[in-house]
Amino acid sequence: ALHPMETIFTSSIDVSSFREGDTVQVYAVARVDQDWSQQQETAEGSISSLPPQTHLVHARTDPQWHYESGNGNGSKQQQQQIQGRLDWISVPLTIEIGPRDTPPLEKSVRNPLDEWEEPEVDIQYEINRIYLLLIGAAVFTLMVFGCFMMNAEAAEGNVKVWAVWADNEGAQSIPTTDDEHETTVASPSSTSVPGAGVVVPKRPIT
């Protein structure tokens, strides 16, 4: 999830005096809520006459402010100590000085930059990747189609054709692999009877 954008302070530092490979730690120092401590007396009195403020306000404006919660008998997680101060120092940002005319390399970012901004997308890389996927899909489809056609031709070459003949012992059928459109099978019986030779069209068994 993206972090909400808050107040951003920008600044710049001169790193020309550093050499390649040097490591620099950068701190941000700020004073906040100073209007409370600098408020002039009003018709109602000084700032001390205002209603009690939150610990956050006191901690940011009064270096003498100190507050402890708990009776000291609880665990450390239950005890809280708040000490007021004026100068607030950020978590250090560590950068490494790189070659000349190149930006410094961030070594310890408090929050990854990709959580604050959209990552850059290499358009050409994405286009090439899509092309490769399409080519792979086309090759796979052709291979499947070729296998299907080979199986179909092999199955067609192995179709059995049956010729029917009859004699005085009854109707019988025998397989034949004759490649003619029609097959004539004579009765093997020595006795010639009507229907002993039957012409049947070649067709696969259904």
Image: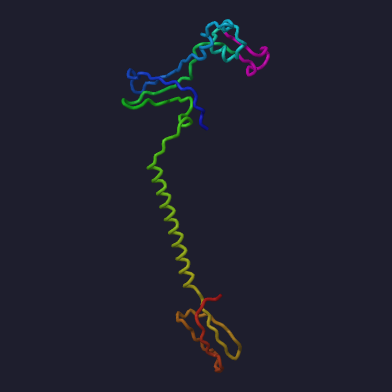
Across and down, in percent, residue 162 comes to: 53, 80
Task: Determine the image quadrant of residue 15.
Answer: top left
Residue in view at x 56 percent, y 93 percent: 194
Which segment did they paint magenta?
Answer: 65-80
Magenta residues, dominant SS class: loop
Left/right placement of residue 14 relative to residue 172 reads: left
Across and down, in percent, residue 134 comes to: 42, 51
- Placement of the C terminus among the 4 image quadrants: bottom right
Across and down, in percent, residue 48 comes to: 59, 6
Q: Residue furthest left?
A: 100
Q: Please tell me how many numbered marks the rendered image carries.
A: 0
Residue in view at x 52 percent, y 89 percent: 197
Left/right placement of residue 74 relative to residue 18 reads: right
Residue in view at x 48 percent, y 20 percent: 91
Q: How is the image coloured?
A: rainbow
Task: Determine the image quadrant of residue 72.
Answer: top right
Residue 136 vertical position relative to residue 81 in the rendered view, above or below: below
Across and down, in percent, residue 80 comes to: 62, 15
**Is residue 11 on the magenta stretch?**
no
Residue in view at x 37 percent, y 25 percent: 104
Residue 139 vertical position relative to residue 90 in the rendered view, above or below: below
Q: Residue furthest front?
A: 43
Between 193 and 15, which is closer to the camera in this rendering?
15
Task: Determine the image quadrant of residue 120.
Answer: top left
Between 136 and 61, which is closer to the camera in this rendering?
61
Between 69 and 147, which is closer to the camera in this rendering?
69
